[in-house]
Image (spheres, rainbow, N blue to C red):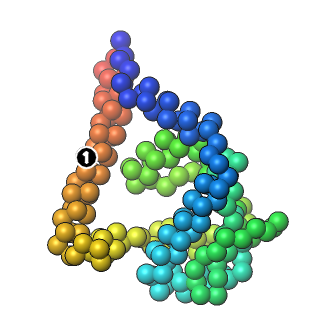
Amino acid sequence: MATQSPFSFVGEALEQFVTHSQPPVWVVDESINRLVLFLNHVIGAEPEAQSRLMRQKGRCIQLQWQDKVIQLSPTPAGLLERVSQPKFDLKLSLTDTSPLAMASAALKGEKPGVHIEGDVQLAAEVNWLIDHVRWDFEEDLSKLLGDAAANTLVSMGRQALQAIQQFIRKPAADAHLHRTAL
């Protein structure tokens, strides 16, 4: 007899909350603004990323997950800005419906399922950004705490992430072993 994880109830409750509750419009709007600022911070540290975005200035990239839509456009400075246009050059739609499934896939290092529609060259540039641009968290943290403290905290964070990844993989491996034993 298969036993159910004690965390499944929490996961189901969290998924119901995330997919069925609607935060106030101003919270969503400000969250998107903060996301764009964060993306620009990360892109600003990578001259090649800025150069690639400069070549795409004025184009509209529409990101969609379920009924949530964000439109971004590269600026002449090679950063991103929010836009609201009736027409897009590239539309990226996340196909996963569960936020928990997407978070789990991200922790495993997998890319989410995406439906791509529109300009192939712009899609290639966005894919390059996704594959090559990374946030140097340790560098930002060292500006606040110093190099030694930042290095220690990041090392501890990596160890915690590895433990979480092993925890996520273990139930799947155990279930596979259980099925093959039957």
Q: Secondary structure at mark 1?
A: helix
Name the residue at 56% across, 33% down. Answer: 16
Name the residue at 36% across, 24% down. Answer: 6
Q: Position of residue 1 (x, y in %)?
A: 35, 12
Is any atom of residue 148 visible in this view?
A: yes
Near mark 1 (Cα within 10 A), the count class, few <14, some 14-19 or many ≥20, is: few
Name the residue at 40% across, 70% down. Answer: 135
Foreground residue, 165 or 6?
6
Q: Position of residue 115 (x, y in %)?
A: 65, 55
Q: Position of residue 130 (x, y in %)?
A: 50, 67
Q: Would you place residue 98 above or below residue 42 in this image?
A: above
Using the rendered view, name the quadrant where residue 31 is placed.
bottom right
Q: Position of residue 154 (x, y in %)?
A: 25, 63
Extreme-top residue of the structure:
1
Kind of residue sitting beneath label 1: Ala
Q: On the picture, is 61 further left or further right than 43?
A: right
Name the residue at 49% across, 69% down. Answer: 38
Q: How many marks?
A: 1
Q: On the picture, is 162 further left or further right than 12?
A: left
Foreground residue, 34 or 176?
34
Q: Would you place residue 32 above or below residue 95 in this image?
A: below
Using the rendered view, name the quadrant where residue 120 is placed.
bottom right
Foreground residue, 81 or 181?
81
Q: Would you place residue 70 above or below residue 2 in this image?
A: below
User: Which residue is tagged 1?
Assistant: 163
